[in-house]
Image: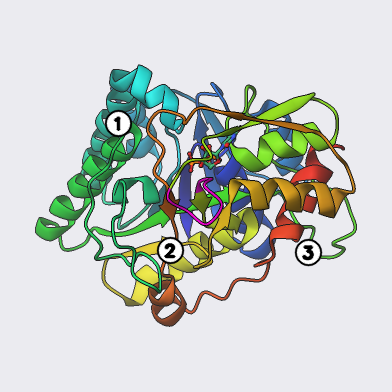
Amino acid sequence: MNNVLVTGGAGYIGSHVVKQLLEQTNTKVTILDNLSTGSKITLDTLKNIREYEFIKLDLKEFDEVELVLKNNSFDTIIHFAASIVVPESVENPLKYYMNNTVNTTNLINQAVKYNVSKFIFSSTAATYGEPINIPENGIDEDYSQNPINPYGMSKLMSERVLIDTAKVNESFKYVIFRYFNVAGADINYENKELAPRIGQSFPNATHLIKIASECACKKREQMAIFGDDYDTSDGTGVRDYIHIDDLADAHIKAIDYLKHNDSDIFNAGYGKGFSVKEVIECMKDSTKKDFKVSIEPRRLGDPATLISNNSKIKSKMGWTPKYDDLSLICQSAYAWENR
Ligand code: UDP
């Protein structure tokens, strides 16, 4: 039986991974979260699936973190806990370098010390920066990494710490996932018509599909498109949106993958891009709700286009997306918001 520590397990992506671990495997799960953005309600909902341990702790408490690793024989750490808002990282870079790079470095250090053999890390397409001459099939894992914001750089630095550490510690392996744009909410496996049990609870949302879903259910009166003068088909930013449950599934696969394979890096996306305008139209169409949209200036730190090449995760890990459908993503985000 696997014994897995999930940092940031009360957060958006972490909680969907925990949900799948509890539902689909017999893994022993421990969640470590400081609840700064994670949700207590989500933790309660997860308890209804199956028992797990919860430790309320900030990763900056190095001594406490060491005790947690010393007192549990984790074989795997799935590390989500991080700050994730691009514009905030531009305003407050040290928050990102401390929360993301420094705390991750300490966690890796403790993981090696206490014989954790597998480390699954949430990285980001933001490490690719502002891609120029994007290949027709999207950005692959070997594409150059030149982050244009501190968020992306804080994650790239953590990637490097992991890679260098694994080079000299044979029994320590990693999977790095570079997430593209994650959206949507829990699809109930037994009945897709049921309302999502968990979703994105982070207050003061900044992510596009979350904001559009808030508009569709009238929690917000209007929203803005940040820039319509990009070098894209309609002038608005283009991103590769992946459903949260497909992304979570990749993490479950990664645990087994590392039992039989070497450390590796995988893009997690669907390999196709939608513009901000297309996403907003899709939210309106798929929910049959209209709302006001204005055009505002570009947002700090935003690249024009980010689209993955996902051949590697499909061929090497055998990952097959189930929810590659923008309307389904929008509908599930809306269903969660409108619950
Ligand atoms: N965006 C927008 N209005 C919003 C939120 C986001 O126009 O209210 C745009 C943003 O400029 C980017 C895309 O939507 O081009 C995706 O942004 P998001 O914050 O969802 O994710 P990011 O790619 O920054 O991680």
Q: Amino acid at mark 2?
A: Ser
Q: Earlier in the sequence, mark 2 or mark 1?
A: 1
Tell me the quadrant of ligand 1.
top right
**Which image quadrant for residue 9?**
top right
Q: Residues within 10 Å of mark 1 (few under 14, many from 20)?
A: many
Q: Earlier in the sequence, mark 3 or mark 2?
A: 3
Q: Residues within 10 Å of mark 3 (few under 14, many from 20)?
A: few
Query: Label 3, on which residue?
Result: 189
Magenta stretch in the rendered image: 231-237
User: Which quadrant, please, contains the C terminus?
Assistant: top right
Q: Earlier in the sequence, mark 3 or mark 1?
A: 1
Q: Amino acid at mark 3?
A: Tyr
**Nearer to us in this view, 24 or 132:** 132
**Which residue is pictured at 14% across the width and 57% down the height?**
169
| Residue 233 visible at all | yes
Query: Label 1, on which residue?
Result: 150
**Which image quadrant for residue 153?**
top left
Spot occupied by residue 263 in the image (x, y as percentages of width and height): 27, 66
> In what element is the residue under mark 2?
loop
Q: Does the magenta portion include 120?
A: no
Relative to 266, say whether 137 is above or below: below
Spot occupied by residue 57 in the image (x, y as percentages of width and height): 46, 24
The answer for how far apart the CA atoms under marks 3 and 1 are is 37 Å
